[in-house]
Amino acid sequence: MVLLAKTLSGGHVPVAALLARKKVFGKVFDSMERAVVHGSTFGGNDLAMAAGIATLDVLAAEKLVDKAAHLGDRLLRALAAMIPRHEFLKDVRGKGLMIGIEFGPPQSLKLKASWHVLEVAKEGLFCQLITMPLFKDHKILSQVASHGGHTIKLLPSLVISSADCEWIVSAFDSVLTDSEHLPGAIWSLGKALVGHTIRASA
């Protein structure tokens, strides 16, 4: 069984769908008694179904899955090409427009010391130093993939353009370049984050 939700309506109406093989579905709803167990007062409303069908129509008509594969590959290659230029950048991976950008300790002693200070305060804190200026200065919304992790997830809309891809790559390049300059605005932010983390855990 696979549960689909969130963007199934293009973000306009709350809607979800459950996919299952006919054999599985038959076992779950094999009698009137079992059918009501999985019912819902608001399930299957007309507006949600119309929004879901319209979204599926757009996905097919505009070939958004193929577009996501093409632009995602372009983004992955462009971001991965930055690895030799940026000490903190360790790996770029993904599928389509679901992209993970992994960071790790640098080689240079000065940057390594700064990385270590952040990690001692809170594991994975460096990623916040990247996501915050990405949003504040470049209007790119990204998210740390997991608590204490060193990977940022990037999930751009399926309708992004080639120009958007260039903008994303340029923004990451700019923020990563800034992260390699000590002292700098990013590390002033890092100092503030470390202070806040220490106070919060005290």
Image (cartoon, rainbow, N blue to C red):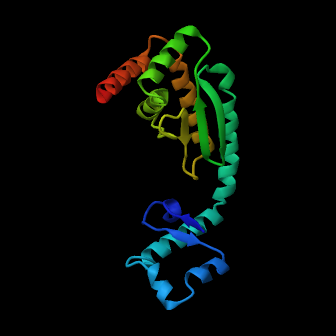
Position of residue 103 measured from the top left corner of the image (x, y, whole percent): 58, 28
- Report the residue at 52% width, 35% height from top: 149
- Report the residue at 55% width, 23% height from top: 176
Q: 65 or 109, which is in the foreground?
A: 109
Position of residue 18 measured from the top left corner of the image (x, y, whole percent): 55, 71
Position of residue 177 measured from the top left corner of the image (x, y, whole percent): 55, 20
Q: 159 or 132, which is in the foreground?
A: 132
Query: Is any part of residue 165 visible from this angle?
Result: yes
- Report the residue at 60% width, 81% height from top: 27
Identify whether 73 is placed above or below 105.
Answer: below
Q: 158 or 114, which is in the foreground?
A: 114
Q: In the figure, residue 54 lies in which quadrant?
A: bottom right
Identify whether 50 is placed above or below 62.
Answer: below
Number of numbered discs visible in the structure rendering? 0
Q: Is residue 159 left or right of residue 38?
A: right
Q: Is residue 65 left or right of residue 18?
A: right
- Report the residue at 54% width, 32% height from top: 150
Identify whether 107 is placed above or below 202.
Answer: above
Query: Is any part of residue 79 visible from this angle?
Result: no
Q: Is residue 108 left or right of residue 66?
A: left
Q: 36 or 183, which is in the foreground?
A: 36
Q: Which quadrant of the figure contains the N terminus?
A: bottom right
Position of residue 45 measured from the top left corner of the image (x, y, whole percent): 43, 78
Q: Residue furthest bottom?
A: 32
Q: Is residue 39 left or right of residue 195?
A: right
Q: Which quadrant of the figure contains the C terminus?
A: top left
